[in-house]
Image (cartoon, helix red, strand yellow):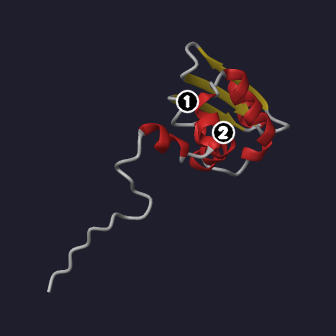
Amino acid sequence: MIVWSTRRPVGVNSRASPADRAKSYPARVEQENTQRMDSERIEQLLRESFPDAEITVSSDDNVHFSAKVVDAGFDGLNRVARHRRIHAAIGPALGREIHALTMDLSTPAEAAGRETS
């Protein structure tokens, strides 16, 4: 026996206007989407998570960014773990407002070793 249902899944209303559907999005998402990301904002987010780090963020077009972070907290962490900490600090903007982020992440000892060579 086959049972057909004419009920729509909960939360789906194809007859709703685009304006009505837009009202259902959380206000925070709309606010985040309207806030433009720039080098200063990214640097601020990183400084909140890495207060003792040396941080430099730059961009030519406010879409493709380059960040250099030197922090003692990276000691003992591999590259993936360091990148995850940066992703967590920046949050959901990575992938929306930020199209690309090149990262140079090192400890103070690693950074000093590069300068002498």
For residue 82, which numbered disc appears in the image?
none
Provide the residue designation for mark 1: 98
Give the residue drawn at x 16%, y 81%.
2
Determine whether, in the image, residue 88 is placed left or right of residue 1: right
Quadrant of the image containing the N terminus: bottom left
Coordinates of residue 90 in the picture (x, y in percent) = 66, 39
Does any portion of residue 19 appear in the rendered image? yes
Q: Amino acid at mark 1?
A: Ile
Separation (CA) of disc 2 from disc 1:
10 Å
* Neighbour tally class for label 2: few under 14, some 14-19, many 20 plus, Cα within 10 Å: some
Asked whether disc 2 touches disc 1, contact meaning CB atoms under 8 Å apart, the reply is: yes
In this rendering, the answer to whether 44 lies above or below 92 is above
Judge left or right: residue 63 versus residue 4.
Answer: right
Q: Nearer the viewer, residue 60 or 80?
A: 60
Quadrant of the image for the C terminus?
top right
Q: Indicate the position of residue 63 as horizontal and vertical percent values.
A: 54, 22
Q: Residue furthest bottom?
A: 1
> Is 46 displayed left or right of 20 in the figure?
right
User: Where is residue 116 drawn, in percent x and y?
Assistant: 72, 23
Within 10 Å of disc 1 (Cα), the crowding (few <14, some 14-19, many 20+) is: some
Examine the rendered structure and indicate whether residue 64 appears above or below residue 103: above
Give the amino acid type for the residue marked by disc 2 in the picture.
Ile
Of all residues, the one furthest to the right in this rendering is: 52
- Nearer to us in this view, 7 or 114: 7
Q: Mark 2: which secondary structure?
A: helix
Residue 114: x percent and y percent?
68, 27
The residue identified by callout 2 is 90
The answer to which of 8 and 59 lies nearer the viewer is 8
Return the residue nearer the eye: 93 or 77: 93
Q: Residue at x 53, y 22 (%)?
A: 64
